[in-house]
């Protein structure tokens, strides 16, 4: 199945096939979601069949909006498609841009809408094995320490989010942990 995502080609937003955007390192739209419960972040370990960064830990879910798909609709769609979660109310937290080598000759040059959703303690997840091999609730402090101590376990974008955008994404969790 060919997925067309919004990417900038010669300064114009154009539908481009997802893999082509990564092969050419085109600047393109993306969505990332962090689900929180108290000070814990729901993390996912990417499935081994993913075409880049397989087996690495990432935020709750992330993807590219389809052509003409609103970022919030995309966030809610991917929560359901990746981890079987519905009924949360993601709140837009940040808009950022980054560029990262994700291996195998692929580059993520993403313009990302970041969402944060609060989850109940009894949140049930149903993993899509094509997307996710495991999930784990990680206290924010543990996540920050592990990203610093073992960055190779985490996706490049998660490392960028934690290093450059932690306070904006996580608010009081990041601020409180600095003291």
Image: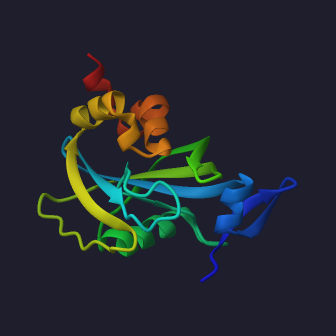
Residue extending farthest to the front is 104
Quadrant of the rendered structure where residue 159 is? top left
Q: Is residue 90 left or right of residue 107?
A: left
On screen, residue 163 above or below 137: above
Residue extending farthest to the top is 179
Q: Quadrant of the C terminus?
A: top left
Residue at 50%, 68% (x, y): give it: 74
Residue extending farthest to the right is 10
Residue extending farthest to the bottom is 1
Quadrant of the rendered structure where residue 88 is? bottom left
Image location of residue 89, percent across then percent down: 34, 62
Q: Quadrant of the N terminus?
A: bottom right
Residue at 64%, 50% (x, y): give it: 107
Q: Nearer the viewer, residue 147 or 50?
A: 50
On screen, residue 81 above or below 106: below
Image location of residue 25, percent across then percent down: 71, 51
Residue at 26%, 25% (x, y): give it: 177
Image location of residue 150, percent across then percent down: 33, 33
Quadrant of the rendered structure where residue 54 is? bottom left
Q: Is residue 59 left or right of residue 164?
A: left
């Amino acid at each position: 199945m060919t997925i067309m995502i919004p990417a900038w080609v010669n300064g114009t937003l154009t539908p481009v096939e997802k893999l082509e955007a990564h092969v050419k390192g085109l600047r393109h739209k993306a969505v990332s979601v962090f689900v929180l419960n108290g000070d814990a972040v729901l993390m996912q370990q990417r499935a081994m069949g993913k075409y880049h960064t397989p087996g690495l830990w990432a935020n709750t879910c992330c993807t590219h909006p389809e052509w003409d798909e609103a970022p919030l609709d995309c966030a809610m769609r991917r929560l359901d498609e990746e981890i079987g979660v519905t009924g949360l109310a993601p709140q837009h937290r940040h808009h950022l841009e980054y560029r990262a080598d994700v291996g195998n000759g692929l580059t993520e040059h993403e313009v990302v809408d970041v969402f944060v959703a609060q989850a109940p303690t009894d949140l049930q997840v149903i993993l899509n094995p094509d997307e996710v091999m495991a999930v784990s609730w990680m206290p924010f402090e543990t996540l920050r320490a592990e990203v610093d101590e073992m960055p190779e376990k985490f996706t490049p974008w998660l490392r960028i989010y934690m290093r450059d955008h932690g306070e904006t994404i996580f608010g009081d969790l990041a601020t409180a942990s600095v003291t």
